[in-house]
Amino acid sequence: MDSANRDLGKCLAEQLPALTRHEAAVESDRCLYCYDAPCTHACPTHIDIPRFIKKIASSNLRGSAETIFAANLLGATCARVCPVEELCEGACVLGSEHKPIAIGRLQRFVMDHAHEHRNYPVVKSSSTGRSIAVVGAGPAGLSCAGELARLGDKVTIFEKREMPGGLSTYGIITLREPVEIALRETRMIESMGVQIKTGIEFGKQISLDELKQKFDAVVLSTGLGKTPALGIEGEQVVLDGLEFIEASKTRTAAMSIARSVLVIGAGNTAVDCATIAKRLGAEQVTMVYRRTRREMTCYQHEYDFARREGIEFRFLTQPSRVLLDGGIPVGLECLRIELGPPDGSGRPSPQAVKGSEFVLPAGQIVKAIGQQKPALAALLGLKTSNGFITVDSNFQSSLSGVYAIGDCIRSRGAASTVMAVQDGKFAAAAIHREFARTPAHVEVS
Ligand SMILES: Cc1cc2nc3c(=O)[nH]c(=O)nc-3n(C[C@H](O)[C@H](O)[C@H](O)COP(=O)(O)OP(=O)(O)OC[C@H]3O[C@@H](n4cnc5c(N)ncnc54)[C@H](O)[C@@H]3O)c2cc1C
Ligand code: SF4
C-alpha cells in the first residue's frame, strides 16, 4: 500500500456545512409557501415542507421539528441522505428560474436543533397493551417501531449488529451521514419507549416461533445481504465495497489505500467507494463498468460529483481475472464489451469480445455490484418475488401476522432510506387497522 491517511475524520468530514441560524432564516424567507406544494408531493414521506419552512422563518424551531416528525421520524437522516435533487428540491417551483430552496439543508438545521437539545415534540397515544417485535434496526425497522410506539404499542427491536441504524450507521459514507447522526436518531426512537436489543441475530439466537409466541405481530426489516461474488479468478483479494465503506465509517486508525484503485460497479455505492478511495489518498481511482454511462444506475448528481472528485470511468469493460504478485493485486485483466439486444433487466446485454483482453493496473480493487437478496425469505419459507419478500398492500407477508418492509421487499426500482421510512410508517398503520378488527393478545404464562 502506498498511502496511509492519518485522519479519517478529517478526510471524510460531512460534505456540506450546517446552516447558521442567520443562513437558515434567509433561506426560509425565499420560500413562496406554495399552495398544494409540489415539494411536499415529491417527498415520499409527504413532509409538509412549506409549513416546516415557515416555522423556521418565524423562529419556531420546535413547531418546525413537530411538522417534520409528524411525517418522518428519521428526518435527520433523510435531510442528509435523500437524493433531494430528484425529490423535493427537484420539484421546487423556484428551480426552473432561480435556485430551488435548500430544503434538505433547512430540514437538517431543524433536526440538528431538535437532537442537540433532545427536544422531541412527538405525541404518543395511551398504551394499547399490545407488543410488537421488529427484526432489524435499519431505517425501515426504526421508523416502524417509532410509529408503533407513537400509536401506543410496546415495541422491541432485535438487531444482529453491535450498533443500530442499519446502513445509515454502517453503509452511507461519512461525507453524507456520520455514524453519530444515525445513532442519536436511534436514541430518540428509544426515548419513545422502544427497546433495541443489539447483538441478537434472528434465525440464530431467536426464532420466528419464539417471536410469534411472545408478540402480537412480527415485522421483518432485515435489509439485504453482502456484495455478491464476481466469479473471477483472484477474487479473494477483491475488497467488498460495503466492508470498505464500513471501515471508513467505524475505524479510527488509518486505512491503507493503494496509489491506484479500481472500483467495479456503476451504482451509487460504487461512486461512494471511489470517493472514499480518492479522499483517503489514492492518486488514481477508476470505475469499471461493462455497459455505458447511459445504463449506469447512479444518480446524475452522483456521477457529476465523481467527475469533480477526479474519478475516471472505463465503460464497456468487464473484469475477467485479478493479476497477483505474491498474493497482492497488481492489475485487473478485462475484456472489451459490445452491447447486444436487451436482457432480462431491459438494458442492452453486455457481450464480451473474444480475444480483447487488456490489463488495467491496480494496487487495490473494490467490488460494489449491489447486495445479495434477503436470505431470510427462503429460511422462513416466505413467498418471494425475484428473491425479495412478497407482501400484500398492508405489508403482510405470506405468513399471517408477519410483516416485511424496507429493502427486503423492494423488488423493483432503486431502494432508498426515505422509502424504507415510509414503509415503516404505512406498515405501522396497517398493523393497527388489523388490530382494530381483532381482540388484544393475552400472554399465558
Ligand atoms: C453503500 C450504500 C449507500 C447508500 N446510500 C444511500 C443514500 O445516500 N441515500 C439513500 O436514500 N439511500 C441510500 N442507500 C440505500 C439505503 O441505505 C437503504 O435503502 C436503507 O438503509 C434500507 O433500510 P432497511 O431498514 O430496509 O435496511 P438496512 O439499512 O439494511 O437495515 C437492516 C438491518 O437489519 C439487520 N439485520 C439483518 N438481518 C438480521 C437478522 N437475521 N437478525 C437481526 N437483525 C438483522 C441489519 O444488521 C441492519 O441493521 C444506500 C445503500 C448502500 C448499500
Ligand atoms: S415548491 Fe419551493 S417555493 Fe414552493 S413551498 Fe416548496 S420549497 Fe417553498
Image: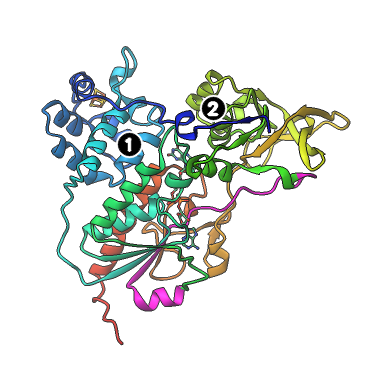
Q: Nearer the viewer, residue 126 or 383?
A: 126
Task: State the SS at label 1.
Answer: loop
Residue found at the far right of this picture: 355
Residue 279, label in figure: 2
Q: Give the label, 2 or 1, closer to the camera.
A: 2
Task: State the SS at label 2.
Answer: helix
Spatial separation of the CA atoms under disc 2 and disc 1: 31 Å
Q: Is residue 235 left or right of residue 325?
A: left
| Rendered residue at 24%/40% (across/down) | 116
Under mark 1, the amino acid is: Cys
Are there few (<14), some (14-19), or many (20+) residues within 10 Å of tag 1? many
Q: Where in the figure is residue 347, as x and y percent of width and height?
A: 64, 35
Are there few (<14), some (14-19), or many (20+) residues within 10 Å of tag 2? some
- The relative height of residue 90 versus residue 436 in the rendered view (above or below) is above
Q: Where in the figure is residue 158, as x and y percent of width and height?
A: 41, 64
| Rendered residue at 74%/34% (across/down) | 318
Under mark 2, the amino acid is: Arg
- Label 2, ligand 1: CB separation under 8 Å: no
* Disc 1: which residue: 43
Q: Where in the figure is residue 61, as x and y percent of width and height?
A: 16, 35
Q: Where in the figure is residue 307, as x and y percent of width and height?
A: 56, 20
- The N terminus sits in image quarter: top right
| Rendered residue at 31%/47% (across/down) | 185
Q: Nearer the viewer, residue 405 or 320?
A: 320
Colouring used for the render: rainbow
Q: Nearer the viewer, residue 131 or 7?
A: 7
Which of marks 1 and 2 precedes in the sequence? Answer: 1
Residue 414 visible to the viewer: no
- Label 1, ligand 2: CB separation under 8 Å: no
Q: Which residues are magenta?
A: 208-234
Q: Nearer the viewer, residue 209 or 166?
A: 166
Q: Is residue 350 left or right of residue 150?
A: right
